[in-house]
Amino acid sequence: MNIQRYHVGPRMSQAATYNGFAFLAGQVADNADGTSVAEQTADILKQIDALLAEVGSDKTRILSTTIWLADISTFSEMNAVWDSWVPAGHTPARATVEAKLAAPQYKIEIGIIAAQK
């Protein structure tokens, strides 16, 4: 099987697939400046939906998710958006941690591993 990379940049690809699995880079909000954790989460989940579709998967096939929050006190705010997005019965294995993110405007980053269809 070949490795396929999507949206290849000089430092990273936005996604890579291999052997029936899709690995998404950590996604941050496109419009993060001045937006809430809930707004950034919704933006990121739209990006994830689009990337998953592009690599031949969808949110029902997510196996593992890592969520990084700049401030863990926003956990419930993020979860309110996440819970309305993830399909019942298809919740992935997940870890959520507090971390200093790449730039101060980012309040959340989400990484995904999924099975392809």
Image (cartoon, grey):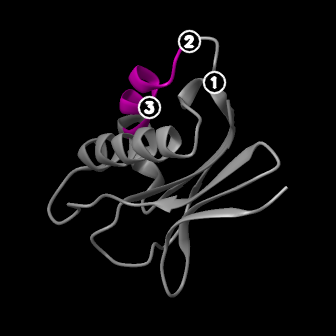
Instruction: Return the disc, 1 or 3, that comes first in the chain's sequence.
Output: 3
Q: Quadrant of residue 63?
A: top right
In the rendered image, which residue does mark 3 sit on?
82
Mark 3, other Cα within 10 Å: few <14 / some 14–19 / many ≥20 = some
- What secondary structure characterizes most of the magenta part? helix
The answer to whether the residue labelled 1 contacts the one labelled 3, judged by CB atoms less than 8 Å apart, is no
Question: Where is residue 92 drawn, in percent x and y?
Answer: 67, 31
In the rendered image, which residue does mark 2 sit on?
88
In the rendered image, which residue does mark 1 sit on?
91
Nearest the camera: 71 or 52?
A: 52
- Give the residues in magenta: 78-87
Q: Residue at x 65, y 29 (%)?
A: 61
Q: Quadrant of residue 81?
A: top left
Q: Is residue 49 magenta?
A: no
Left or right, residue 63 beside residue 68: right
Mark 1, other Cα within 10 Å: few <14 / some 14–19 / many ≥20 = some
Q: Quadrant of residue 116?
A: top right
